[in-house]
Amino acid sequence: MISKIIEKKLVSLQLVRGLSSSTARSARNNAFNTVITEEVATKSPQLVTLHNRLRLPGSFKLSTLGRCLTCIQKDNKYPNNVGLSIFGKNLLSYHATELLLMKYPRLPLNVLNNAINGIIGDETLYSIGKEWGIQTDSSTAVEKFLNEEPEEITIGRLRFDNQNKSIESNLTVIDKKNTLTQEVAMASAVKSIVGAYYASSKSLQDTKKFIYNYILTTRHLKIQDMFEFEQPTRELAALCKRQGLEQPVTRLLSESGRASKRPVFLVAVFSGNEKLGESFGASLREAKIRASVNALMNWYLYSSLDVKLPSDADYSRETLKEVDHGIVIV
Amino acid sequence: MPVKALKATTVAINGVKSFILPCQKIKIDYCNWGGSSLGIKQYIQSKKFQKFAQDNQNIQINLHHRPGHHPVITGYYANGRTKPICVKNLDLETIDKKMDIVRSSSGEILGKYKHAVQSVNESARGIWSPLHVDPSQRHKI
Amino acid sequence: MNSIRLLGVRSFNGSTTQIIPRRTLVNTGSRVRGMLRDPADYLVSSSGRRYPENATGMAPIISNLKNYLSQNSVEGIDDKVLLQVLTHKSFAHGKKPFNEKLSVFGVHLLKEISAIHLIESEASEGASVEGLNVDVLGGTLSKRLLHKSVLAQFTRLNIPGIEKDIFWRNRNLMITDPAVNGENVVLFDTILATVGAVNLIKGKGVASDFIGKAILSGENSLVELAKATISKPQENKSE
Amino acid sequence: MFSQIIKSGIQSQKRSVSTESLPKLAVKNKFKSRGSAFNFKPQKVEPGVYHQPSPSIPSPLQKTPNAFLPASDIRKSSSSEYTAEDVSYMPPLSSVKEKKYHLTAQQIEEIRQLRNSDPYTYTRKALAKKFDCSEFFVSLVVDCPPDRLKDMAGRLDTIKSTWSVRKKEAKSDHEKRKQNWYRNA
């Protein structure tokens, strides 16, 4: 799709405030007469390339894609993507919760929430949006007018009231009143693309496939680095008592250099003669704490061999007798 | 005082279930008057360029008339970096190769990597520890 | 009053579990800080029900929930899981399996299915996308739908006698207003845990049908309750 | 390595053979090990199945101890003789103290009064010795009176003020390293 643009050198202009007349219309109210029409959208290079990049189905119209990039603005020319992004967020948070809960059934709730935020939080969706090639629109109405920027180029970009507007080279205005930051705007665009995917395909299975292919499996989450314990030995004892295991006993497995500058003690926590967790330490106290942390991680990060998801087509877990008890409360 | 949660650190891995080409936009600057733009002008009107654009619908291509300068092909990438290649006085075939270079590059700074394999997964057999080696094979000081 | 109680620790060595009896002083009745509390004290829910130890004790407690589920053609959920759905985290210091994770699973599924239901059926003044009125989602109706008091009201109406079945610890028995003394929160968690359990055991298909038929439609459905709270002028803002 | 085969091979039925019962691979070097470490010539190894466990701590993501496996998991071996370890040569770090719970309500009230009335003579250590319980239990029964806490904090500050800059840095580095103890880092 070749398009010829004459990108003139920008003339730095004294900004004339309020050139573009905007009727008083509440940003929430989306009842607009001007809608992004399909024939304008097909001419937009950014929309066509984004559509191809994500291999979106034919039913996903380019005008809908244009709407996904229209964030809430003071003077919205086109209907914005607030409803779509809320819907997309609901779809995303269900699939992220399901994936994490079924993979690690014993995950504590606060770790689960942080992990969900790690996979589909605004920060992550911002970097996903950039990888998808969504360009943000940073030129003001005056510059668009002077450059005679055609409509299809404008709708191809992410349009929002930026919180920090740079007027001149070293001057940025930070205006927090109902404006969006770059991350929030890009994240809302990605979420509304997910919402629009369901709207056009009308099938949860296809939307799930899209979410997994383009969002959930494109991030690797280091879940083992997300735990911090305050009194691990007490918590492990409470866990063993709750599960009916024998009281944990920490034993010294082997050591090296006890009298030297850098001793290493290998210590393990046993319940009866079953090992629960082991670790090294420069001192016996450190080794004991690290061993019970390792044991608790072995408990919380249990994952079964055949992870099945409720949203799979042929899913049924009649045999499931016990659901995870819950977090250990000391 | 149950377990506390730390902030999640996630790493981007492209190409697991879907691959998104890092090159997003290619800008071709040409000059209508200068002789050095002869090759690029032939290339723009050639079948090869049509085929290139048709095959890569996921790359936005801008033709930009920039009088008084040598012709340049600039690639814009997902990591925000650009890759300009000067194509002055080049003929049609070479320009096609340059376009392919710009298309298939990732935009990262070219350099040598210390390890052959870069992975986000933990090692399968774990970090070797001398205290876990079988006592019969332990290193005797 | 100290009663000597045989509190044992089960040792896991191979197949047999063996109780080691030892002399333990346990305090019953008024709480003495530092004394080991008699489990019988905290294993009673605020509605006076004792936590069942075996299957026979469990049957009467989960009967209301089980009937509600079978009325909506959802069978085959294990009794222990149903008991866990009825146990809140505040009960017995979390010593008994509680329903926190099930309710988290349920709230996300309910949000998704109710969002789809709303954008397909509710009219909205905004421009629709492919025939779906997506701008309903930001509005008051969708927020009201998942409000604690509305869902609690729904649970009370649809599962009669559920308040007495739930095992939770009421911080202050003097406060009777359900919005303040935590009863709404507990009912909110229970209905969501039911949805989570159905989703976990029967799968998403059965769960979304259950939500569609039982929760979002029917005579006193969640949508009508939410609409009622919007149209009715708010008497107390604290709701 | 070997456990991977078991895991992928036998999906449905229970584990019939345990890895622990297989002979361990003791690859001996023909020559003196230290001298020919880089010119390693292994002795002939009869063909057969050997168990070569990885000499490292298994990661929580890859292996769950047998005691923590739920009953529904096929990796769970019911009898622990496969997974138990010979702990006879592993001394416990501290003697296993059996919790006594022998104090009556009156005695606990007494501990509280003594502690509140005169915290300086009735310290946690003294009360623990007097009532034959652990200091931790004394802290469960009664909090330390606030004025003693302030006094002790003041004494600690005066001690810290005598620290040199290098010692202060070393102590704060140690605190940072201690944080990693609790983070499996």
Image (spheres, rainbow, N blue to C red):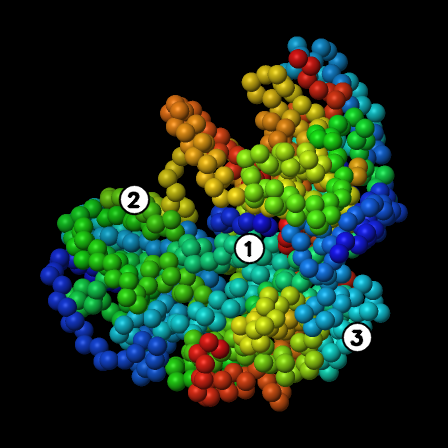
Q: Quadrant of residue C150?
A: bottom right
The residue tagged 3 is C60
The structure residue drawn at horizontal position 18% and vertical position 58%, both measured from the top left corner, is: A167
Q: Name the residue under label 2.
A: B85
Q: Is C226 on the left-hand or right-hand side of A123?
A: right
Is label 2 or label 3 in front? 3
Q: Distance between the residues labelled 3 and 1?
A: 34 Å
**Distance from Cα at disc 2 to Cα at disc 3:** 79 Å
The answer to whether marks 2 and 1 mark residues whose Cβ atoms lie closer than 8 Å is no
Where residue D16 appears, as percent x and y from the top left, is: 86, 44
User: In this rendering, is residue C121 above or below C146?
Assistant: below
x 59%, y 72%: residue: C174
Crowd rating for badge 3 (residues with CA inside 10 Å; few <14, some 14–19, many 20+): few
Task: Give the numbered dot on residue C185.
Answer: none
Residue pictured at 67% horizontal, 23% vertical: A255
Identity, as a three-letter code, of the amino acid under mark 3: Pro
- Residue C235 horizontal/vertical position (percent): 45, 84
Both labels 2 and 3 in a single chain: no
Placement of C81 over or under A100, stated as above or below = below
Q: What element carries label 2?
A: strand
Quick check: do tags 2 and 1 share a chain? Answer: no
Distance from label 2 to label 1 (Cα)? 50 Å
Mark 1, residue position: A110
The residue under label 1 is which amino acid type?
Answer: Asn
Please report, as a chain letter, where disc 1 is located: A
- Residue B47 in sight from this viewpoint: no
